[in-house]
Amino acid sequence: MKKNCIVAQSGGPTAAINASLAGIIKGITDSDCFNLIYGAVHGIQGVLREHFLDLTKSTPEFIEALKITPAMYLGSCRFKLPGMAEDVTLYKEIFKVFDKMNIGAFFYIGGNDSMDTVDKLSAYADSIGSDIKIAGVPKTIDNDLVCTDHTPGFGSAAKYIAGSIREIAYDTYIYDVESVTIVEIMGRDAGWLTAASVLARNPKNPAPHLIYLPEAAFDEEAFLSDIKHLLHTHQNIIVAVSEGIHDADGVYLSATSAAADKFGHAQLSGAGKYLEQLVKNRLGIKVRSVEVNVLQRCAGHMASKADLDESFALGMKAVSLVLDGKTGFMTTLNRTGNSPYSYELSSVPVCDVANKAKAVPLNWINNEKNNVTDEMTEYLAPLVLGEVSIEYEAGVPKYLDISHLL
Amino acid sequence: MKKNCIVAQSGGPTAAINASLAGIIKGITDSDCFNLIYGAVHGIQGVLREHFLDLTKSTPEFIEALKITPAMYLGSCRFKLPGMAEDVTLYKEIFKVFDKMNIGAFFYIGGNDSMDTVDKLSAYADSIGSDIKIAGVPKTIDNDLVCTDHTPGFGSAAKYIAGSIREIAYDTYIYDVESVTIVEIMGRDAGWLTAASVLARNPKNPAPHLIYLPEAAFDEEAFLSDIKHLLHTHQNIIVAVSEGIHDADGVYLSATSAAADKFGHAQLSGAGKYLEQLVKNRLGIKVRSVEVNVLQRCAGHMASKADLDESFALGMKAVSLVLDGKTGFMTTLNRTGNSPYSYELSSVPVCDVANKAKAVPLNWINNEKNNVTDEMTEYLAPLVLGEVSIEYEAGVPKYLDISHLL
């Protein structure tokens, strides 16, 4: 008798995580190797609570609609499993549910913290001699997972950032008055998404004129000097800054408003506002800050087709690897060429990924620490290509009903 | 010999003001009644500085691209003419330029303050017996001009707000934790754009759960009580608030950060942040605020087709009225039906429009002052209909080159 399987999602939302879910469902349906497909609601917590949606009868139409629906169809959680050595209770509970439901595989789509869960569950399965396969599929707009060229969700967020910065630049250029516009972009420790602002430029549009990533120490005096210098030749200056920029001692510009989340990450906001005040006080010119905020991670209406296609393929790949008997892995994408852009799908042991982060290489930041290099642009360019045709109802983007989460 | 004409833009940018410019150029080109078409750069200041672009040879392709390019192709200004009685110097200078350039008509696309300029220039023309025609074409995302059913630019901003709120809601719904998300929307004195958030709702999506407009006094205790009440039945609450909400004494929630612009309007920011802090302090639950900021006025990639078509038509109409010998008017749109939606184009003497503002009628706000009525929804619905097909270059929206403004 065929076994059943569970799929779940975790971490922050993206425009592409449902595409990976769609890929997993498609892979399972095509292979016909599992009986029932359960979607655990709210990640691993849904397993503990035995809160499932039955995804077995997903139609091709549903799968297509799922692929382009942003945020998380199954809901998310921010839940860190304790170490096995600390407390094995939850592991026992989870595998009790797996056994009761005759589960053969568990697919978890998420970022760094979710891969930690995949790592721990597969180690536990191994320790008790369970043959339940535990598979990870990457996801994060931050693009900071190691062992993969880039992460699902990043390309769509990058496209939204590039498009928005271009539109903000157009908005700014209209006035015949010196001005500075500071755009604050998500990315606590990794500057990938802020770097993607470079794609807003073209031969006729120099914005963003300055780009500051958290990988390089931020120097307020150098920043003010960069602005003053540019004002000799440019009237309206657009600056892209990561929320996580910090000084040489590692103190965040937004430190006064920092608190920590459950994983110990600082919760930041305010680098843009801080710099707005700095420019106002020190240079006395017109200045405004724009915090792009949550729209950058869930704007399904401007998703990257390349991103959704890859996210879907990485979900399919996870299924095929599980069917090959693999466990404890995360699917990965290896770039094999830039012109034309090409890649291969593969996987790595999830322990190589969990709890690690990939920063922007320092040699992809210019010497002045206020711009990115051509290598960065070349790396980013293919990830935002292609548009997704979404349906509108009454003039507003139409997505799958997620009222089961309400 | 045929006369020449000037067109200019003024005030804040919108996704549709270039569509009106395109309509004016098309109207003039089709009629063949003027010789040269000058575009004054940076509004009426461009006339004073004699800074013009020659738009005479605009191709159909240019006109089409102009129609979907957001912000202002000709640049803007914030320039208030002094009253004629106060100081006639600038009027003389402007008409000296008009005479020198053999101008027969001046078209000004803008909002309230721009219509003040149209009013003053046409009064001056009358006072000196000039037969130069002065025409106004409306524009403002605020939708607060009187004598017209709605204003060009509003429908696109409304569509962006509705779409963004729906995506923000999807982003929010994924967590199994009580939360409040406050979205701050532009609209200093008029709540039209905040009201448009209602279009994000559908039978499966209740967000925004609460809507607060500046036309009704905002009561902090009633707001907290609204949230507490909703939390009995809803886990994630989305609140749409206008930047201009204020208490019964007229004191803005964001008053601490208020300053005044040249027209004496308070420059606001911070109602969302203020309420975020209030909810955190008083209710102690997860809360975040999102300031939609400039993207709501210039997001050409999510423009309303209805809006761009109407904006274009209002530009064409201005030309035909000038050719009929009219002056000192603003073109208007009169709604003639809702199902199906229909309208007629007309005009009013610009003195009826200048320096007046149209607030949301109080009977379109519910008794609890935390929602809008069905009449409001019916009014708004047709304005966001239809999508515009824009071109992407390398994955990013492609618009007309506006480097002549840099």
Image (cartoon, coloured by chain):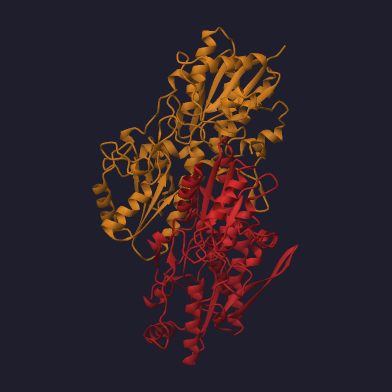
Chain colours: A orange, B red
Left or right of residue B169: residue A212 = left
Image coords of residue A51 (percent x, y): 65, 27
Task: Choose between B87 and A32: the one closer to the eye.
Answer: B87
Q: Quadrant of residue B386?
A: bottom right
**Percent position of residue A328, x then y:** 52, 16
Q: Residue at x 49, y 30 (%)?
A: A342
Q: Residue at x 68, y 44 (%)?
A: B204
Answer above or below: position of A281 versus B334. Answer: above
Q: Is residue A371 left or right of residue A324?
A: left
Of A205 and B125, nearer the camera is B125
| Residue B75 seen anywhere in this rendered image of the structure | no
Query: What percent of the width, then of the height, locates residue B289?
Result: 49, 48
The residue at 50%/44% (across/down) is B287
Nearest to the observer: residue B149 or residue B396 = B149
Q: Is residue A9 above or below residue B203?
A: above
Quadrant in the picture for the C terminus of chain B: bottom left
Q: Is residue B256 left or right of residue B199?
A: left
Residue farthest top in this picture: A129
Residue A404: x and y in percent read: 67, 36
> Total of numbered circles in the picture?
0
Looking at the rendering, which quadrant does residue B263 occupy?
bottom left
- Choose top left, top right, bottom left or bottom right for residue A134: top right
